[in-house]
Image (tube, grey):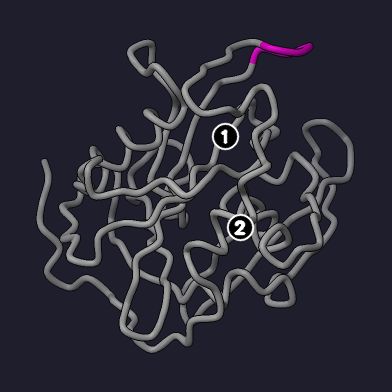
C-alpha cells in the first residue's frame, strides 16, 4: 500500500555552501572497478556480498540543497525505525547498481527515474552484516511529491546538506563488536530530533570528507 505524504517535513532555511556541479566534480574520479556505472559485480574478492544500492537524494530549495532521508517502518524485521536512504538490495533484473538505487527509490518514495539526475557515485560501503552498499548521489526535481510505500517507510524528511557535509558535526566512537570480538567504528550525526547512525551515517561521513577535499574513508563494519 502506498500513500501520498501530507505532512512532509520540508526545510527551506539552509544556506547553500555547495552546488550540484561541485558535487559532480568531487565524485568524478570515484569509479573503482567494482563501482562503475552500468556494471554489476557479485561475489568479487574473498567474500560473496549481498549487493545493495542507495540513492543520496538531493533536492534544491530556495536557500540551498537538502538531503531527503526516510524513517524505516517500525514493524520491519531489520533496522526498524532507523533513518536510511531510499534503496535496497539488488535483484537479478537490475542491469546496474544505479538501476537498483533508482528502482528502490521509486518503490519506496514514489520518485520516478526521469526526476533524477545522477551526479556521481561514492565508494561502496561494506557492513558487518554482509551487505555491500553502492551509494549514488542524485539531484531530484524540486517539484517532487513523495508517495510512500507504508510497508517499508514510516516517514520522509529533509536535512540541510551543508550540515551533513561538515565532518565536525559527526560523533565518532569505537565500540566492541561482540559477534566478531573486534573494535569497530560507529558514526553518528544529529539534526534536530533526528538521530542518523549506522551505515547511513558512515556513507554520509565518507561523502562529507570527499566533498571537503580531505579524501577520508570511514572504516567498514559500522552497521
User: Vertical placement of 50 versus 195: above or below?
Assistant: above
Q: State the image quarter where residue 51 is shown.
A: top right
Mark 2 neighbour density, 10 Å: few (under 14) some (14–19) many (20 or more): many
The residue sitting at 71% across, 46% down in the picture is 222
Task: Work out whether residue 222 or residue 213 is closer to the camera in this orientation and state it.
Answer: 213
| Mark carried by residue 133 | 1
Would residue 147 appear left or right of 160 to someone viewing this image?
left
Task: Work out whether residue 48 or residue 28 is closer to the camera in this orientation and state it.
Answer: 28
User: Vertical placement of 137 versus 143: above or below?
Assistant: above
Would residue 168 appear left or right of 38 to someone viewing this image?
right
User: Vertical placement of 209 versus 45: above or below?
Assistant: below
The reply to whether residue 36 is visible in this rendering is: yes
The residue sitting at 28% across, 60% down in the picture is 155
Q: What is the distance, in whole Å, between disc 1 and disc 2 at their CAs?
A: 12 Å
Give the magenta part as a residue range: 44-48
Q: State the image quarter where residue 31 is shown.
A: top right
SS assignment at label 1: strand
The residue sitting at 82% across, 53% down in the picture is 175
Tell me the residue that label 2 is attached to.
204
| Mark carried by residue 165 | none
45 is within the stretch colored magenta: yes
Position of the N terminus, as image quadrant, is top left
Q: Position of residue 169 (x, y in %)?
A: 68, 76
Would residue 131 appear left or right of 115 to someone viewing this image?
right
Q: Position of residue 192 (x, y in %)?
A: 48, 82
Task: Work out whether residue 201 or residue 177 is closer to the camera in this orientation and state it.
Answer: 201
SS assignment at label 2: helix
Among numbered discs 1 and 2, the one appearing first in the sequence: 1
What secondary structure characterizes most of the magenta part?
A: loop
The residue sitting at 78% across, 65% down in the picture is 172
Position of the C terminus, as image quadrant, is top right
Would residue 32 appear left or right of 79 to someone viewing this image?
right
Amino acid at each position: 500500500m502506498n500513500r501520498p505524504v501530507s505532512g512532509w517535513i520540508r526545510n527551506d532555511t539552509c544556506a547553500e555552501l555547495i552546488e550540484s556541479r561541485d558535487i559532480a566534480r568531487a565524485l568524478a574520479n570515484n569509479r573503482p572497478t567494482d563501482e562503475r556505472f552500468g556494471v554489476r559485480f557479485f561475489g568479487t574478492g574473498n567474500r560473496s556480498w549481498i549487493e545493495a544500492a542507495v540513492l543520496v537524494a538531493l533536492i534544491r530549495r530556495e536557500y540551498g540543497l537538502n538531503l531527503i532521508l526516510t524513517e524505516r517502518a517500525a514493524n520491519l524485521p531489520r533496522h526498524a525505525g532507523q533513518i536510511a536512504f531510499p534503496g535496497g538490495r539488488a535483484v537479478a533484473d537490475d542491469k546496474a547498481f544505479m538501476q537498483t538505487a533508482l528502482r528502490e527509490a521509486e518503490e519506496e518514495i514514489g520518485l520516478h527515474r526521469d526526476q533524477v539526475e545522477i551526479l556521481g557515485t561514492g565508494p561502496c560501503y561494506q557492513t558487518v552484516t554482509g551487505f555491500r552498499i553502492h551509494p549514488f548521489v542524485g539531484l531530484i526535481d524540486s517539484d517532487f511529491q513523495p508517495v510512500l510505500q507504508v510497508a517499508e517507510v514510516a516517514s520522509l524528511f529533509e536535512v540541510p546538506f551543508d550540515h551533513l557535509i561538515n565532518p565536525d558535526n559527526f560523533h565518532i566512537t569505537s565500540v566492541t563488536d561482540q559477534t566478531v570480538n573486534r573494535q569497530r567504528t560507529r558514526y553518528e550525526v544529529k539534526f534536530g530530533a533526528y538521530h542518523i547512525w549506522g551505515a547511513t551515517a558512515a556513507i554520509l561521513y565518507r561523502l562529507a570528507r570527499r566533498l571537503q577535499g580531505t579524501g577520508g574513508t570511514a572504516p567498514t563494519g559500522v552497521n
